[in-house]
Image (tube, helix red, strand yellow):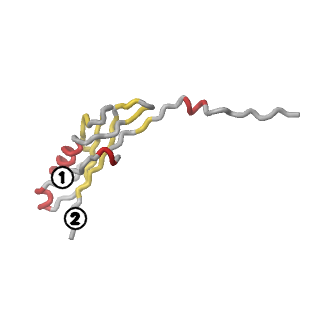
Amino acid sequence: MGEAPAQATGNPVASNVELRINARFDAAHLRNSPPPYPQASRRRGEEGLVILRVRVGANGRANEIEIAESSGHERLDRAARSAVANWRFEPARDGEHAIESWVRVPVAFRLERS
């Protein structure tokens, strides 16, 4: 009679693969406060979305911040950059090791209408 089919044990391919996980800023335990709305911008009705490009160190701190996309208002861009400079991040991981990486951080400024 024929031989029984071979049975795989484990997954040898997956066991050698290290997972890379991107840096994060949105985890609730990080307690990152939104930037304060600049009063001059509030009075002038300035709104916008700032996209920051942040180099996050293995220690979870912002090592470098660039404006990837401006809100169109310098005050809002500065406020976003200043706030994110003090944020904590979950650093990227290569397997179990924290590594430096870049992450895009959107910061929205919207006035409430009553």
- Image location (x, y in percent) of residue 20: 44, 35
Disc 2 secondary structure class: loop
* Left-right relation of 46 to 96: left
Question: Which residue is rendered at x = 14% and y = 57% of the image?
Answer: 41
Q: Which residue is mark 1?
A: 36
Is residue 35 depicted above or below 12 in this figure? below
| The quadrant where residue 67 appears | top left
Q: In whole angstroms, how far apart are the C-alphas of marks 1 and 2?
A: 14 Å
- Image location (x, y in percent) of residue 49: 26, 54
| The quadrant where residue 29 appears | top left
Classify the position of the C terminus by image quarter. Answer: bottom left
Amino acid tagged 2: Glu
Q: Residue 112's mark?
A: 2
Amino acid tagged 1: Pro
Is residue 95 depicted above or below 82 in this figure? above
Q: Residue 68's mark?
A: none
Q: Are marks 1 and 2 in contact (CB under 8 Å)?
A: no
Q: Residue furthest bottom?
A: 114
Q: Residues within 10 Å of mark 1 (few under 14, many from 20)?
A: few
Question: Which residue is rendered at x = 52% and y = 31% of the image?
Answer: 17
Q: How many numbered marks, from 0 up?
A: 2
Q: Residue furthest front?
A: 29
Q: Which of the two residues, 110 or 69, is positioned nearer the viewer here?
A: 110
Classify the position of the N terminus by image quarter. Answer: top right
Question: Which residue is rendered at x = 22% and y = 65% of the image?
Answer: 112
- Image location (x, y in percent) of residue 48: 23, 56
Q: Residue furthest right?
A: 1
- Image location (x, y in percent) of residue 28: 33, 48
Disc 1 secondary structure class: loop
